[in-house]
Amino acid sequence: MRNASAFAPAIRGCVLSHQASLQAGGCSMLRSAEAFSNARQGGVRMISSGGWKRSEGQFNGRLASSGTVVARVVEIRRGEGRGASRYQQQRGRGVDLAGEAQEGHSNELPGGLVTTEHFFEVPLDHDKPNMGSIEVFCRELVSVRNRNNKDLPVLLFLQGGPGFPAGRPVSGESGWVKRALQDHRVILLDQRGTGRSHPVTHETLAELKTTEARVGLLSRMRADSIVRDCEAIRAALLGPGQKWGVLGQSFGGFCIVTYLSMAPQSLDKAILTGGLPPVHKGCTADLVYEHTYPRMAARNEKFYDRFPQHEESVREIVAHLAKAKVALPGGGQLTPGRFLQLGLLLGGGDGLLERPWAAPGKLSYEFLRNVESQTSFETNPLYAVLHESIYCQGTASKWAADRTMPERFDHAKAVKDKQRVYFFGEHTFKFMYDGDYAALAGLKETAEAIATKSDWGDLYDEAMLKSCKVPAAAAVYYDDVYVERLLSEKTAALVGSDPGCTKMKIYVTNEYQHSGIRDDGYAILDKLLGMLAGTVNVPS
């Protein structure tokens, strides 16, 4: 789902330089299985990183068999650092958690916001911990006035995506963060494969020499693995038996529905904004696109009705791109398809680009640079390669967006017939790997393998969702072109529907688009918290 962060743009980069390799039946990722085993036996290594010393804390406990979640915390220290707190083993639905927790460096930001870094080492594959481990990062936020309140409820934020890190806070004075900090300690997680959590980029994927190895890594970057990382982190930070709340935007909400399926006993509340997925078995991408293509067509019509002058200008640009080979400043080629992917902006309330021509028949450098900056597929390749897989349980997606595209999105026909040219929504296509995006060109075989992969594991458990007793509230956007409202309402009706369980409350609104949490995060979170507390009578 499209990223809608309330923060400044993320600073991306790998925490540790590394060589990564995945082979059939085994792998070494950041830490080899041998190093993981050595640390388990009590070994400590110091790793220099930018003037900081990173100490791998002694691993306490055991690496259990399949179904085990294990976290080893990696300490960031300056000088003597801070004291460690040991967390015990906890069993719940066959899950063991063990390790040591260390606080990292803290900063005090404007608006009375205190941030603290935390690093954890978790298995790449939670079912096969001997395959090796990766590092996962999160940042803790708390207001200055609450920094010593150890009983403050904890709220984990899961970012939209897939493939985007949590936002980087610059203050605690606005947005949903301001509201959350009034009565919560907030944890911002860089989901595995993003930000400072073993980032997966086209460069790191290039280090893996086979398509099989890349697919092996990418298949371990979905919501089920993210949730198991969360469980390990929860036990490390909070201690055994302690619960936390979760807030998820878009794909982050998908992750929460997976969390409610896998480990609801760990949650005291669940809050979702624009992120309720269809949950039945198979691949639901076809069903999603059957709804969102028409929604996107309607959004296009609204756009052209509001800005009729762009009908002809868009046709001119598409016609030009169909005839001319237009190189982009950063590499790759601007084709009609890539240009029409700017329709992503229509789902978030942003405007489209202006002043495209430098001269008749020549697109301006400014326009081309702006086109490049408006899409995240190259800097966040998980968003492209894994997008349709977030809908897959036991079935391949088979390039669902290509297969289900309605005729009215045929841009060549629209230009020929002098009709309105429709922009695409949140769709990923085969053509993206044909040179349109330079950084994706080397991933063509990998993307094909992901699209045809059929042995995806389950992400949701309908029986568990029906029996849910976790208080949950969701914002559902009436005209959302990313997450279909009707499918969201169906999932919401399922959660807690068994007798004696806790039904999910939903707030359906057309006041916001998919980017509501970014546009008016304080008001939306305040309403959802009020719904859970019973102080806001929604639904009436």
Image (cartoon, grey):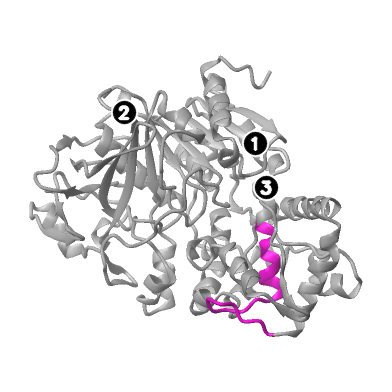
Asked whether residue 410 is drawn in magenta, I would say no
Q: Vertically, is 404 above or below 66?
A: below
Check disc 2 and report the residue beneath it.
Answer: 144
Tell whether 255 sits left or right of 345. left
Question: How far apart are labels 1 and 3 at the CA level?
Answer: 16 Å
Residue type at mark 3?
A: Gly
Q: Position of residue 236 (x, y in %)?
A: 25, 39
Task: Give the residue at x 9% y 55%.
Answer: 44
Estimate how packed mark 1 is, as few (under 14), some (14 to 19) or many (20 or more) residues with alpha carbons within 10 Å.
many
Check disc 3 and report the residue beneath it.
Answer: 349
Task: Give the residue at x 15% y 36%.
Answer: 86
Asked whether residue 333 is drawn in magenta, I would say yes
Which stretch did the figure color magenta? 325-344
Asked whether the viewer can see residue 425, the reply is no
Residue type at mark 2?
A: Val
Q: Quadrant of the C terminus?
A: top right
Estimate how packed mark 3 is, as few (under 14), some (14 to 19) or many (20 or more) residues with alpha carbons within 10 Å.
some
Question: How far apart are labels 2 and 1 at the CA level?
Answer: 33 Å
Whether tag 3 and tag 2 are in contact, CB under 8 A, the answer is no
Whether tag 1 and tag 3 are in contact, CB under 8 A, the answer is no
Please tell me whether mark 1 or mark 3 is closer to you in this view. 3
Q: Position of residue 439 (x, y in %)?
A: 50, 75
Front-most of residues 219 and 160? 160
Which label belongs to residue 476?
A: 1
Q: Residue lying furthest right in this view? A: 417
